[in-house]
Image (cartoon, rainbow, N blue to C red):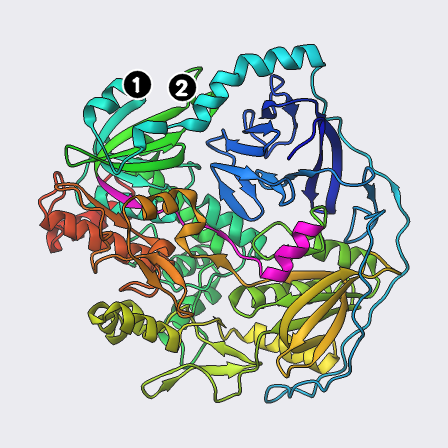
Amino acid sequence: MLKFPVELDIYRNEPAGRRFIARIALPEEGAYKVGRSKENQIKIDFIDVSRQHAYLQATRDGFTVLNRSASGKTYIGGREIDKASWDGVAPLRLGTSVEIVLASGEVPLLTADFDEQARGGREQTPPPKRESFSPPPAPAGVPRQSPLPTASAPAAPQTPAAHMAVELPDITTLRRQLDDQRKDAEAEMKFPGNLFRGPVVSIQDLAQSGYVVGQCEYLSVGAGMGGFTWVDHLRLFGTPTAAIRAVGVHFQPYNNYKRYCAYSQIPAHERLRSNSISAPDNIWGFPGYASRETWREMKRLNLGGMKHILQVFGEPAVVQSYTPQIGDVYASIEREMKRIGWREMMVPGVIVALRKTNDGRYAVAYRVGEEEAGGGQRGQIIIARYLQLATGYPGTRFTTQLEDFKRRFPGDNQVVGSYEPHDYIYTEAEKSKRPAVIILQGRGIVASRVIQRIFEARRENPHIQVVHLMRNPIPDNGGASWGRARRRVFNHTEMQPFNWPKSAWGGEWRRDLERATPQQRAEMYRRIGGSHTAPRRDWIRIQRQGFAEGWYHVRFGTISGIEYQQEERRKLAVTVDGFDKQKFTVVADAIIDCTGLVGEVRNSPFLQDLLETYQLTQNFDAGNRPAGFAVTNDFEVLGMRNLPGRVYAAGQITSGGPYAGVDSFLGLQYSALRSVDHLYESGAPWIKRFGPLRSSGQWLKWCVNARP
């Protein structure tokens, strides 16, 4: 139950840390507009906040948040939302950096280093007693570990928070504005309302609703990497741009992918965990990234560029596997976007719901931004006969204890996920020159990259220590096995060049997965699933060096509690339930959680609505947890056929199904190829047979950058 006036604190995550912006008071109930433009009641003038970003509806029963932006996203905790209730405790994030929480205690102060917000007035639980324990054996070839670091530093002085003014209008103006926009807010929050109350909607009702803005044959629900790849295949198979639409938030299909890469410390010059021929812009795989990189270097008269081609021929037995620079991936997708006419087909909007129609098609409801609506209604519906669902990962993951800590201390910026902005962790550690302890939780490809980033930070501050927390040890001969093959293990982490064995893409394992029952698939995933990383020589060298120099420490267990130390609030007292059943405590400056992204479809309101409306079947992952939608070998979603209409899916929302590497570049291409081939066999319009002659002709057009 809310009591008015309700006070809210606004923060911004910046490279230097979390900054307190302002405290505002909502004087009474109403739907408050939030955004950059001056007509908003809550005006927040930062570039990553949209002009008309959200409605914040405040009543005595609580808050409801509605995302109003087609280009900027809204999150509660780590979960992206379109419309959701909000408890005021989990941070409400607008765009990439601005967060809002219910005010608590005095107006925050700023401190230096990792924690820019002082937590005055909170009672802190005394940290658990530090218990002694023996460090686990180091991996072969590295020395035994040193005891855990106990870095400490004097508390930083507190200074008043400098902040930008975020003010509400005067009460008379505010009441008039809230009354004027009440009906609009209610209409937007209810869209599409009773129109989509059942599993099938009639074409007549849709026509009378006034929401329908267009029709097409092929519609990608999601305009990210998966949607782009499917549209690319449709164009190559002969479909004109007028018959295709893709609804999504960003014009650049790689926008979310680029953001996740940047947050997980993979800048444009770094290399991905992918191979040369997995090129989203080129379904033939030739010329691949290695050939292109070699050609670029040769044009600069750099004969050393030949190493990229030679690396492909020698991988992985003679040399480590070739991986492309991520900047090359972005540039190649931009080129293909222009070639196929992507902007002619892309519709900016946030997907809300999907329903079957009574004439064998599908109605997709979405919201456009205020600017895109041009003064008209923001709720719109498009009707299509053939759909692909490619909405990407439903959200980011936090372990239970970390999530609990974030809820108790919403202003905290010392506990972060690897897929959220956290550059300030490294930059502040570099600048401080003082001892710092960073706990890294999880193992896998992102954890390896974070260790590399910390290694780079140690060049500026050699006093940084890393405690790498893993759930359990893995002996050198304990890697996952299938038949006579077994994964190599280094430092209790399994090694594999790509996220699945190569036979999962086009060999025996793919064949066996397609033939398996759902129960057999779950067992296959259990046997070779789990976290692993690429056997990159530089990563192995960094860890060996860390062991030898005593700044890298591996411990086993799970975090069971996090508190601030009473005597030094900037330090975190982290209690760990050890793998050996012994508790121990680590005093740290920051925790970086590398446990990954959320693949369970129920974490997306749109996908959960589909699941419940049509009682769709789900797959199960390696841990026997619900995963993606059950699909056929052609990636058609079981239970969504509406003849002649069909719905296909791609990416992580099909995880646990007949294809393992669904969230890889090659996996997105494979699902697109299978689904478009299936459409051709079903007699779908405009799609032509993609035989040798057509394939050769389209490849030549790709080479000269001509339209398909």
> Are there few (<14), some (14-19), or many (20+) residues within 10 Å of tag 1?
few
Q: Is residue 469 left or right of residue 389?
A: right
Q: In this view, does 135 lie to the left or right of 596?
A: right
Task: Residue under label 1, please give it.
Answer: 210
Answer whether labels 1 and 2 touch (C-beta < 8 Å).
Answer: yes
> Are there few (<14), some (14-19), or many (20+) residues within 10 Å of tag 2?
some
At x 63% / y 43%, what residue is drawn?
A: 91
* Coordinates of residue 670 in the picture (x, y in percent): 27, 58
- Name which residue type carries label 1: Gly
Task: Residue under label 2, please give it.
Answer: 377
Residue 284 visible to the viewer: no
Q: Magenta span has 396?
A: yes
Whichever of labels 1 and 2 marks the residue nearer the N terminus, that label is 1
Identify whether 260 is placed above or below 171: below
Q: What stretch is highlighted in magenta?
A: 386-408
Residue 650 visible to the viewer: yes
- Name which residue type carries label 2: Gln
At x 46% / y 28%, what residue is drawn?
A: 189
Q: Is residue 408 left or right of residue 445?
A: right
* Residue 671 in which image quadrant: bottom left
Decide which of 208, 598 is in the foreground and name it: 208
